[in-house]
Image (tube, rainbow, N blue to C red):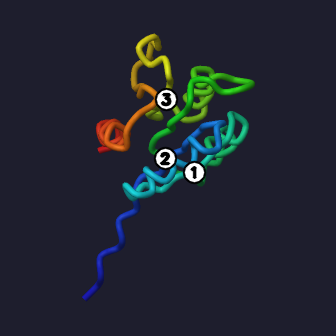
Amino acid sequence: MSTPAPTVQPTILVVEDDDIVRMLIVDVLEELEYQVLEADGCEQALAFLRDDAQSIALMMTDVGLPVMDGRELAKQARLVRPGLPILFASGYAESIDVPEGMAVIGKPFSIDQLRDKVKRILP
C-alpha cells in the first residue's frame, strides 16, 4: 500500500515594507496552511518572481511601497509571470482601479476578510 503524497499548499508571495504588518499577514496565511514567501520590497519580490524554480500562486502586495509602488510591481510581475493573480492591500481600497485578474483588500483587514479574499482567488 502506498501512502498518498502530502498535498502541497499554494505559495503566496507577500510584499510589504512594514515589518510588523508583513509578519502579521504571513502568520495568518501560514495558519491557513499556505506556503509563504516574504519580500520587504520590489527588488526582493522580483527576484522571487524571476526564479523559475519557485512556484508562486498569488502575489499579495502593499500598494504604497518605496521605490516602485504596488501597481508598478504588478505590471513587472505580469511581464515575468503572465496571468499571476495579484491581491493589493491598501488603506485607500475604494479609490484603486484594479486590472483584470487582480483584487484589492482594504487595510486594516480582519483575519476572516484576508482568508475569504485569498480563498476566492485561489481555488
The answer to whether the residue labelled 2 contacts the one labelled 3, judged by CB atoms less than 8 Å apart, is no
Q: Quadrant of the N terminus?
A: bottom left
Q: Residue at x 35, y 65 (%)?
A: 7
**Residue 36 placement (x, y as % from top left):** 52, 52
Query: To which quarter of the image does residue 20 belong?
Result: top right
**Residue 82 placement (x, y as % from top left):** 51, 31
Q: Quadrant of the C terminus?
A: top left
Q: Nearer the viewer, mark 2 or mark 3?
A: 3
As drawn, 101 above or below 15: above
Q: How many marks?
A: 3
Give the CA separation, mark 1 to mark 3: 16 Å
Q: Residue at x 64, y 38 (%)?
A: 18
**Residue 53 placement (x, y as % from top left):** 59, 54
As drawn, 12 above or below 35: above
Which amino acid does the dot numbered 2 rest on? Answer: Ile
* Residue denoted by label 3: 89
* Residue denoted by label 2: 12
* Left or right: 59 in relation to 123: right
Q: Residue at x 37, y 55 (%)?
A: 32
